[in-house]
Every structure is written in C-alpha cells, then in structure tokens.
Image (spheres, rainbow, N blue to C red):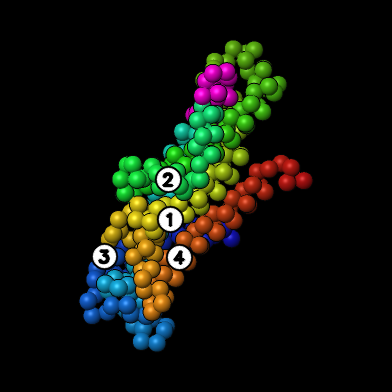
Amino acid sequence: MGLTIIVILVLLALFAPILAPHDPNEQFRDALLVPPSWAVDGSSRFLFGTDDIGRDMFSRIVYGARISLSVGFMVVALAVFLGIALGLIAGFFRGVTEILIMRAMDIMLALPSLLLAIVIVAILGPSLINAAMAVVIVQLPHFVRLTRAAVISEANKDYVTASKISGAGLLRLMLITVLPNCMAPLIVQATLGFSTAVLDLAALGFLGLGAQPPTPEWGTMLSNALQFIQRAWWVVAFPGLAILIVVLSFNLMGDGLRDALDPKLKR
C-alpha cells in the first residue's frame, strides 16, 4: 500500500506541468478563497479551491509534491552517503578515530532534532537549501551509528577473515566485502528517514525557516494559511493532508521492507 501511494506521488511530481491546471504562482484576483469544487460556492476551475491571493490550491499541492519528494530524496541520499562513510571509518579504524566520530554523533543525538535543525538554519539563514542541509545534519547520526554497529557485527565473521587471508586491501574489505552485508538495515532506515526528512522540512517551512514564499512548499503553505483556518478550511487541510499521506506511505513501506529484509521475521 505504501509503495503504491509513493508511486502515485512520484508520478504526480514528474508530470506536475501536465496535471496541474494552472501555474502554481498565478493569481486569480476575481477568485479569492474560493471553496473546493464540490463545496457550496465552489468553482469547477479550482478543484481544491484557491488561497487568500487567488492561487489554485490543487496546482500548488501537485508542485509541492515535486519539491518535497526531490529535496527529501537528496537529503536522505546525502545523509546515507556521509553516514556510511563515517560509519565504515569508525567501524574499521577503532580507537581515537572511533571515539571522536561517535562522541560527536552522541552530542548531536543529545539535542532534539527539530531544535538542532532550527539552530542550524538560524545560523545559515532561512532558505530551502539551508533547511535541507540542516535536515542532513540531523539525520546523519542515525546512519553513522547503524553502519558502525553493522560493521562491527560483520567484521569478525569467517568470510571477512577469509577475505583478509586472501590478501584483500582495506578498501575492498570496506566497500565490497562488508558493506553489502550491512545494507539491509540501512535501506530500512533510509526509507523511514525519508518520511522524517519530509516532516522536518515541512516544519521548518511552517516556522518560516525553510522554503520562502511564493514557493509552493507544503509547510510554507500551512504557515501562510494559518490565519484563515476558521473561514477557509481547505487552505490548511490539503497541505496538511499531503504531508500526512507522504509520511504515512513511507512509514508503511519502511515497515514492509523491514519485514522483508529481516531474516528473523521471515520465519
């Protein structure tokens, strides 16, 4: 179910220029806060209604999927890459190197993730790129700790010892021998991390620290529409529902991958 929803969302994002009936930033001055098409006083021109300055909500939701999914994918990809690199180094180079890396990760984990992201964006300045970098830093400790634990678990097994005896170099041991056998938990964590990344980006956008108007990003849309929640429910409901669907679908897929990749659960 989660994978099906994700495929639909990806298709929406890819074909946003075709599926969206209007430009996401086009303003219809004669149609301010128009209800959804099925509601009383709704218009067939605007499926999900319009916001306070006459922009089509459906078009902005569809283009918002493109922003949230693409930025979320880049965030998770970068966090996984850096996390695997640092985790492999910590797992193979024990001693001072491991202590320095892991204590730094412990310090980052000691701070609430959203608070840490807010501090980073406050230092760098509010923008979508800076918010994405902040989320990468917040996500990084989880992948470092997971990779290190998997490397330590695999390093003493017979196949690694046989590879060492056969003359395999350090890079070969790290990247070809050990890493492929550590990927199952990392794939699950990356899937669950994607939903967290989308949620954190939306939270930063809601606080005015992420994407800036008029960018059709779901968190920013929520922030701009909050004052109209009592008289125009659709300007808040649809961006919030979009965030809920994305987070839920990736969590469902992460649970399914965990069940599929964990040999203990296969029994």
- In the picture, the quarter occupied by the N terminus is bottom right
Question: Looking at the picture, which amino acid does disc 4 mark?
Answer: Gly
State the image coordinates of residue 159 (x, y, percent, origin top left): 67, 22
State the image coordinates of residue 253 (x, y, percent, origin top left): 58, 53
- Label 4 Cα neighbours within 10 Å, binned few <14 / some 14-19 / many ≥20: some
> Left or right of 67: which side holds 82?
right
Most foreground residue, 200 or 67: 200
**Residue picked out by circle 2:** 117
Q: How far is the residue under mark 1 from the one under mark 2?
A: 10 Å
Q: Is residue 89 magenta?
A: yes
Q: How far is the residue under mark 3 from the one under mark 2?
A: 28 Å
**Residue picked out by circle 3:** 25
- Label 1 Cα neighbours within 10 Å, binned few <14 / some 14-19 / many ≥20: many
> Element under label 4?
helix
> Left or right of 200: which side holds 155?
right
Q: How far is the residue under mark 1 from the one under mark 4?
A: 11 Å
Residue at 47 percent of width and 66 percent of height: 241
What label does residue 203 carry, if any? 1
Residue at 36 percent of width and 60 percent of height: 220
| Region of the chain picked out in magenta, as a range | 84-100
Question: Looking at the picture, which amino acid does disc 3 mark?
Answer: Asn
Question: Looking at the picture, which amino acid does disc 2 mark?
Answer: Ala
> Element under label 2?
helix
Q: Residue furthest left?
A: 29
Q: Main secondary structure of the magenta part?
A: helix
Q: How far is the residue under mark 4 from the one under mark 3?
A: 19 Å
What label does residue 240 carry, if any? 4
